[in-house]
Image: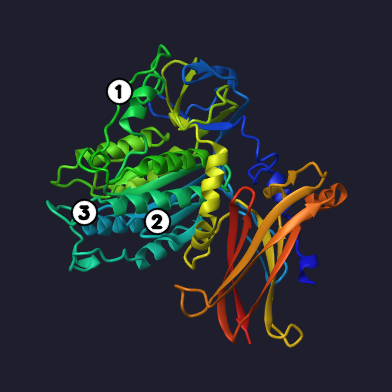
């Protein structure tokens, strides 16, 4: 069987620095590891790279916390190393291709903004990739009604430019002009508007993106090319409470920090909707999305796609600044040189410190808990996320369970990127006379990315869903699909062997002759974490 011939390198990768950590005791809810990335710069804006753990102090909601983990992350002048494993023929893996201290994600926003701004942003993005030398992996997504992967992580600037040149944002309603006919950035009026649908789309796709990126280790810099953000992830009530602890302007020479007034979201959009009841249901969703971004170590770098124009857009720009400063990123506004802004955003998060701690607070009441970090070093500025929502893990797990089928389906769509929260290899055996024209897919799942639960019977339990979607000429809908749940009730000796090898499952499909794109997925029903990858097969 091909399953027995799989190169089981996933467990070794997971245990290396930068690999997916082993899941242990996943249902413990009385504690939570909080990870905070801190960018430290001197008065000239240069990275400070010689601080130690004892140089930092950390408080949560005004109470000192013990720093349990500390590391310094930097490129060291070397390029990101591609993680390559020699796999047998017809075997694929969803293990991350690159090992890097930080990943960069460009999000081209085709939902929020005018077609004119999108055209200009597209030109500038293509221009950037035509000359950029990338030393860290970059992936490019498009924010449409669904999240669309344009190119997975790569350091090949030419390949990224090619997909940008080829990409065309979807037509907007009530707009008769073509995309290429509206390339002037200097406009006074356009088709941009924010409505409930745009807000819901943005939040939903951001949540999906955060879940996808959470499987990758380290910091992710999200370069968001957009004319406007429809909503602040941190409402005014949260910001007022957080400002007493979070340092937006950076730490001053005396170590006290300088504070600015909280930035308001656009009062003509989301706040109005809250008052009229149009967006009442978004409050919980905003908390969930903000928490997902923070848990995935995502710092947002908004780049204003409108450039310099005659429109007054102070409210939307304030929202961009708000989202950036409170996730540890930067906002780039009021410039037509978007290529410089994109490059600065990609470079900014390459050098940083990672601090982690187990908070003394054990209440999961959904309240926002501000984080304050200081250093004894004078004349430096610190940028980091300002806190997190104390969301109940059990409640979140229940909500995810209610939508797990929808989430898995979205990640198995043709244009969806690979998910790496659950690692696996898969061997594809094409149909033959011996298999009665059935396609066989054997999965070898990294057991360290599965949550096993030990119960009173002394067994280790897990529930794993393995699924295959086969796309033919129609890329919108799979021609065939197959999924099933595999239950594991392992004795200690069997569990020990599995943890040294892999967890197996298999699926079969009966396909007509032709060329197919296979989307392969694994879902852990205990944690609702997902892994996906893609391959092709020809059926004779």
Sequence-first disc among 3 and 1: 3
> Residue drawn at (42%, 49%), measured in percent from left and top?
206
Q: Tell me where residue 405 appears, x and y as whole percent.
A: 54, 59
Is the C terminus in the top left, top right, bottom left or bottom right quadrant?
bottom right
Q: Where does the image place residue 245, in percent across and percent down from the top left?
A: 41, 20
Q: Which residue is mark 1?
A: 260
Mark 1, secondary structure of its residue: loop
Q: Quadrant of the N terminus?
A: bottom right
Whether label 2 touches label 3, CB < 8 Å = no
Q: CA distance from mark 2 to mark 1?
A: 36 Å
Precedes in sequence: disc 2 or disc 3: 2
31 horizontally vs 412: left or right:
right
Q: Is residue 539 visible?
A: yes
Task: Check residue 335 in the rendering and tell me which mark sits there, or answer none.
Answer: none
Residue identifier under label 3: 192
Marks 2/3: CA–CA distance = 27 Å
Residue at the spot of label 2 = 129
Residues packed near mark 1 inside 10 Å, few (<14), some (14 to 19) or many (20 plus): few
Residue 50 % position (x, y): 55, 24
Going 66% across and 43% down the picture, which residue do you hit?
A: 21
The foreground one among 90 and 539 is 539
Measuring from the top left, give residue 273's x and y in whole percent. Answer: 25, 43
């Amino acid at each position: 069987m091909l399953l027995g011939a799989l190169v089981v390198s996933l467990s070794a990768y997971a245990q290396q620095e930068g690999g997916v950590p082993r899941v242990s005791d996943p249902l413990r809810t009385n504690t939570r590891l909080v990870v905070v990335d801190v960018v430290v710069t001197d008065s000239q804006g240069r990275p400070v790279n010689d601080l130690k753990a004892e140089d930092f102090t950390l408080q949560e909601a005004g109470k000192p916390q013990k720093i349990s983990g500390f590391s310094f992350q930097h490129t060291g002048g070397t390029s990101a190393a591609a993680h390559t494993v020699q796999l047998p023929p017809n075997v694929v893996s969803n293990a991350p291709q690159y090992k890097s201290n930080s990943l960069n994600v460009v999000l081209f926003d085709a939902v929020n903004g005018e077609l004119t701004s999108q055209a200009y942003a597209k030109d500038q993005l293509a221009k950037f990739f035509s000359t950029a030398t990338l030393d860290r992996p970059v992936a490019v997504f498009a924010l449409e009604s669904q999240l669309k992967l344009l190119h997975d992580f790569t350091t090949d600037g030419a390949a990224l430019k090619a997909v940008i040149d080829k990409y065309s944002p979807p037509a907007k309603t009530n707009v008769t002009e073509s995309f290429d006919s509206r390339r002037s950035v200097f406009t006074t009026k356009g088709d941009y508007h924010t409505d409930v649908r745009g807000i819901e789309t943005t939040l939903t796709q951001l949540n999906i993106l955060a879940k996808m990126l959470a499987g990758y280790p380290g910091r992710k810099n999200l370069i968001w090319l957009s004319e406007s953000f429809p909503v602040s992830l941190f409402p005014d009530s949260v910001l007022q409470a957080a400002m007493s602890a979070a340092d937006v302007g950076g730490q001053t020479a005396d170590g006290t920090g300088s504070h600015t007034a909280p930035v308001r979201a656009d009062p003509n959009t989301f706040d109005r909707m809250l008052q009229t009841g149009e967006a009442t249901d978004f409050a919980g969703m905003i908390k969930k999305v903000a928490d997902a971004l923070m848990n995935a170590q995502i710092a947002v770098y908004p780049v204003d796609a409108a450039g310099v124009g005659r429109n007054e857009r102070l409210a939307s720009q304030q929202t961009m600044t708000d989202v950036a400063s409170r996730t540890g990123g930067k906002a780039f506004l009021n410039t037509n040189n978007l290529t410089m802004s994109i490059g600065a955003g990609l470079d900014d998060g390459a050098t940083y410190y990672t601090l982690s701690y187990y908070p003394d607070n054990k209440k999961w009441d959904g309240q926002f808990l501000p984080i304050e970090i200081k250093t004894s070093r004078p004349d430096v500025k610190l940028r980091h996320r300002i806190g997190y929502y104390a969301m109940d893990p059990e409640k979140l797990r229940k909500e995810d369970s209610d939508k797990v089928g929808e989430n898995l389906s979205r990640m198995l769509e043709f244009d969806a990127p690979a998910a790496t929260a659950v690692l696996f290899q898969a061997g594809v055996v094409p149909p033959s006379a011996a298999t009665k024209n059935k396609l066989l897919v054997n999965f070898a799942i990294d057991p360290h990315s599965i949550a096993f639960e030990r119960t009173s019977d002394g067994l280790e339990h897990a529930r794993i869903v393995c699924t295959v979607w086969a796309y033919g000429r129609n890329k919108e809908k799979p021609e065939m699909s197959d999924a099933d749940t595999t239950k594991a009730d392992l004795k200690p000796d069997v569990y020990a062997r599995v943890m040294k090898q892999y967890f197996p499952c298999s699926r079969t499909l009966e396909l007509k002759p032709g060329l197919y794109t296979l989307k392969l997925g694994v879902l852990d029903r205990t944690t609702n974490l997902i892994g996906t990858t893609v391959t092709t097969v020809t059926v004779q």
